[in-house]
Amino acid sequence: MEGRSAIRRFPRGERCTQCGDRKYYVENGMRFCASNGHEIEGFVHFDVGDIEDSGQKGAVAKREKELRKREKKQLTGLEGKSLFLEALQLVLRSQLLWLINDKGHMEELETVVRDLWDLRIRGFSALVPEENTGEGELEMFNSQPSSDAESGVERPKVQTLSWDPERGTDWPIPRLVETLSMCYLGCLLLRIPTRIGDFLRWANGGNMPYKQVVSLYCQSILARRILILPQYYGLPQEIRDRMLPHYTTVFKWPLHTPLEGGELHRSVRHLASGYHYNYGMTFPRLNEVPMMVQYAKHLSLPVETIRTAQALSAALECSFQFPTSKSRSFPVDHPEILLPALIIVATKLLFPFQGSQLSSLDLEGVPALKLDWGKWAQAQGDLEDSASRSRREKPPFQDVNADEIVSMSAEELDSYFKGILTLIDNRSEDPITQFFPIEEPPPPEGLIPDAPGSEVDGRARDILTAVTDTPHVHADQDGPAPIHNKYEAFCTVEDLPLMARKLYTATANVAGIRLGTLVRAVYMLEQRIIIWQRIRRHL
């Protein structure tokens, strides 16, 4: 018989039915309360020995733990900024692949731009995480010109050019528009004659990965199967889920606000000044001759314009470099604005706007030509640049106030809310939201096709054949007698006559700048030419 065991405690909720004692002991297979020895009925103790001797008592079923769906945590603070930089780097690489594969740029462009990107974000890697990991402020994209840009004077502050990691949380994060500026500076280092106006047209037209970096990835899975899209895609959904809303809005905003040429020109100028300030880099001059040829083709101007523009630039000793060391600069100091200004001045010297008269400019070996400005303006109007149209088109919900929303019709409200929907991320897990389904955002706009080079050449040839004419020379004359016309300079946009406005507007569209900026740059260039002529007379 088994002896008395040690005193044990009843399981939770059990006790002696007679005295209420909570402790018991086992003796001869029976259980008794420890205080009074009352027998606890319904309990028989068996000693089964070791586990090997106990045998199989029955199947044991384990209950599987329910897998809980964990929501991905959005990264904040320094981690959030680092993820945003990775997203910008992905967009930058997509743009480089597009330039190399679609536009035929040399493969070395990717290496050069990668080095520029490493120099730009080198200060961020030295930042030390702080205890307060609150959301850092990010300068949002804004297409509206600043007061200095509107007045035509740029005064870059030294603090804004510094990329020193000692600035801490005030360290300047790159903006989305800087990815385009960095690609342009890479082309400049490799002497590739790609203009800022080209980048502006590609970005606003949806061809280059900039405007639709968010919507492109939605089509990438299907596109990889049927080979519609190339090997570069937009921003992956996994990255968008981990970013804060004010970061993802940066990539969505270009869908609704077209990039302005002045913004891209300022970004290139500011980025070039930043490299000069932080690393002492000096970018080479523009490859101006091929760019002048591009302007002559897009504007359908005779080749004599290029020769005259070259002569003017040589006389004025134009450097065609970014004024990175100047604390104050004017639009004409920007090489990408100086170049179209030279084209306009050369065109006005060769082909005055008064009827079909000849120019008084005496150039040896250059045949005198007449240009019918009426036919030229009509041809340019019929073939308006697509980039200018996309830049002027504004979505219906831009700059809408509360009164206008109240007065909208049902169709206008649907269009308004669909546009707002593309700026919002639906991440709510509340089951009540299933009773209020949200419509899918509208599909991305169709791409604006970019005219191939052969089409531009053919269009320029056809227009020049129709609008130019060589005057007849009589046998008793050495050449046509030039008519001495008075050169006209225009200070403001309001001073432009009809034909001059057509020329200035078409050139501004090709260059990707505002009409007022181009008018001021041309006027400043004309003043410099006058000063140069006066100095030459006194020498």
Image: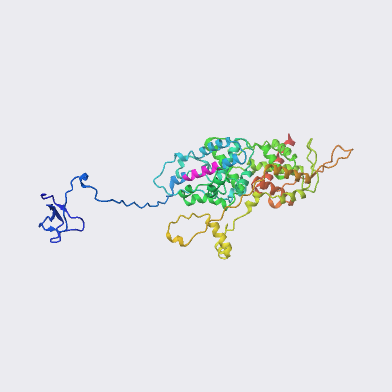
Image spot of residue 420 (x, y percent): 53, 57
- Between 474 and 213, the one lying in front of the other is 213
The reply to whether residue 494 is visible in this rendering is yes
59 relative position to 137: left or right: left
* Magenta residues, dominant SS class: helix
The reply to whether residue 300 is visible in this rendering is no
Q: Per the image, is 344 magenta?
A: no
Screen quadrant of the C terminus: top right
- Between 164 and 204, the one lying in front of the other is 204
Farthest right residue in view: 476
Whether 396 is drawn above or below 100: the answer is: below
Image spot of residue 371 (x, y percent): 78, 45
Image: magenta residue range:
83-94
Q: Choose top left, top right, bottom left or bottom right for residue 537.
A: top right
Q: Residue at x 61, y 51 (%)?
A: 446
Q: Per the image, is 90 magenta?
A: yes
- Between 332 and 29, the one lying in front of the other is 29
Image spot of residue 349 (x, y percent): 75, 42
Q: Choose top left, top right, bottom left or bottom right for residue 178.
A: top right
78 relative position to 396: left or right: left
